[in-house]
Structures are given as C-alpha cells and as structure tokens.
C-alpha cells in the first residue's frame, strides 16, 4: 500500500520503504515503487503515465516525487528542489557542522559504484550533527544530486553510513543502510506556492541509532 504524503492534480509524493526499487529493471519489474503507483492510477481510473522527478537507491527510504504530467516533470527538474536526508554514520565526524564538496565520478569497471575523483562532477553536501555516538545521527542537505552522493561523501571523510555494504567495506548481501529522505521543498509549478513535505526518521533507523547511543 502506498504511503502518500502529498497529492494534487499535478504531483504525487510518496514515502518509499527500504528494499524496493523506484524504477523497474529487466530483472525486476513488478515489485517496484513505479509499479505500485501505476496500479494506484489504474485503480482510480486515471489514464496517467509515470513522470519521476526524484529517485532513491533500493535500500534508501523516504520521499520520492512523481509528476502526473510531463510538463510538470520538466519544470521541477529545471527549477530544482531542496532535498534533506537523515543519515546514520559510523566513525568520528570532523565537526558538528560542515560541508563536504569532493567531486564524484563513476568508478572504472563498475556500473554502480562511484568514487571521489578530482576530474569528477562537482558535488556539495552540508551536514549537521544531531547526536554523536558509535552510530551518529546527522541531517544532510544536498546542493547537488549525484548518484550515491551522501554515501560517497561520508565514506570519503572516514564515516561511512551504517550498514553500507558498497562504501563501508561490509561483506555480504546488500543491507538496509542508514539513509532516509526526510524533506523535499520547492515552489509548486502551478500554484507558485512554496511546498514542503517531510517524513520522520523511520522506526528501524530510530532503533538502530538509539541502541547505539553512548
């Protein structure tokens, strides 16, 4: 069942659980967020196609935006959105508040993995520490939207995300990692009213954080 956080004639914003893809692939096309939204449209008798404005990794939870019309999708992509995340990080952060601005590029030989590289695309992540401990809770704001940006940036300062197999040197199958898209804000393309949608830290991440407090 979809966890709808905002909906009108132009937009649909849903809260994605961890463990499912946003978009279908050749290997997985039914158990995706896009498939659930398509079913929701059909059940309501709406002849709508999917126009995603944002996306999240499979093991990241939180807010995802879909436009109901292609022109709305184009306007939102062009004007941009403010995106914030909760992250559970390991290690010791260099400061309570900081900006990480390492450029990021695709890692040679990998379709998925990214790395910090001087010739990569410019990236900027701002973070604020909420609570320090063996697993620290931080709130991040993205100023750019590169693939795996938060995961790569925190790994780059020696503080990989909790349970991040790809960037935290954790062996085994992919785990639910400590990342949740908690806020999306933008000027609505039709009404021109500033819209802000939020999502609280989910229960599984809250328990992981609280169980590791000093």
Image (cartoon, helix red, strand yellow):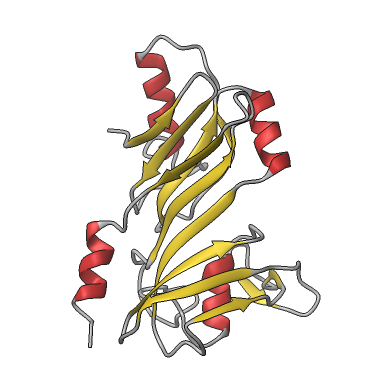
Which of the 4 image quadrants contains residue 40?
Answer: top left
Please indicate, yes or no, whether residue 2 appears anywhere in the rendered image: yes
Image spot of residue 212 (x, y percent): 23, 81
Q: Is residue 24 visible?
A: no
User: How far across and down, in percent of the image, does residue 76 sit?
Assistant: 65, 37
Residue at 68 percent of width and 77 percent of height: 102
How many numbered discs? 0
Q: Position of residue 143 (x, y in %)?
A: 65, 61
Q: Is residue 193 above or below residue 23?
A: above
As displayed, is residue 169 above or below residue 50? below
Most extreme residue toward the front is: 193
Q: Nearer the viewer, residue 139 or 63?
A: 139
Residue lying at the far right in this picture: please name it.
Answer: 119
Q: Is residue 155 left or right of residue 133?
A: right
* Residue 132 found in image quarter: bottom left
Residue 7 located left or right of residue 207: right
Of the pair 54 and 184, the residue shown nearer to us? 184
Q: Is residue 164 above or below residue 48?
A: below
The quarter of the image holding the N terminus is: top left
Quarter occupied by residue 5 = top left
Q: Is residue 200 left or right of residue 13?
A: left
In the rendering, at what x and y percent does residue 27 appear? 47, 44
Specify the quadrant that holds the C terminus.
Answer: bottom left
From the viewer's perspective, is 1 left or right of 185? left
Along the viewing direction, whichever of 165 and 161 lies nearer the viewer: 161
Tell me the residue at 52%/33% (across/down).
66
Residue at screen point 42% across, 74% down = 165
Residue visible at 31% across and 87% down? 134
Nearer to the camera, 8 or 187:
187
């Amino acid at each position: 069942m979809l966890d709808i956080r905002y909906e009108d004639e132009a937009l649909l914003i849903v809260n994605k659980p961890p463990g499912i893809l946003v978009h279908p692939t050749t290997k997985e096309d039914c158990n995706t967020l896009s498939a659930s939204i398509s079913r929701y449209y059909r059940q309501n008798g709406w002849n709508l196609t999917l126009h995603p404005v944002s996306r999240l990794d499979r093991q990241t939870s939180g807010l995802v935006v879909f436009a109901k019309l292609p022109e709305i999708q184009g306007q939102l992509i062009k004007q941009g959105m403010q995106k914030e995340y909760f992250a559970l990080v390991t290690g010791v952060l260099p400061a309570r508040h900081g900006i990480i601005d390492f450029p990021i590029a695709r890692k040679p030989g990998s379709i998925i993995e990214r790395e910090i590289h001087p010739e990569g695309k410019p990236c900027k992540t701002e973070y604020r520490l909420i609570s320090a401990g063996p697993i620290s809770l931080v709130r991040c704001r993205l100023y750019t939207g590169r693939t795996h940006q938060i995961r790569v940036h925190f790994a780059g300062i020696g503080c990989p995300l909790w349970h991040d197999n790809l960037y935290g040197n954790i062996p085994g199958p992919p785990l639910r990692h400590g990342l949740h898209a908690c806020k999306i804000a933008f000027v609505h393309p039709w009404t021109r009213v500033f819209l802000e949608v939020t999502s609280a830290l989910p229960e599984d991440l809250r328990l992981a954080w609280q169980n590791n407090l000093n």
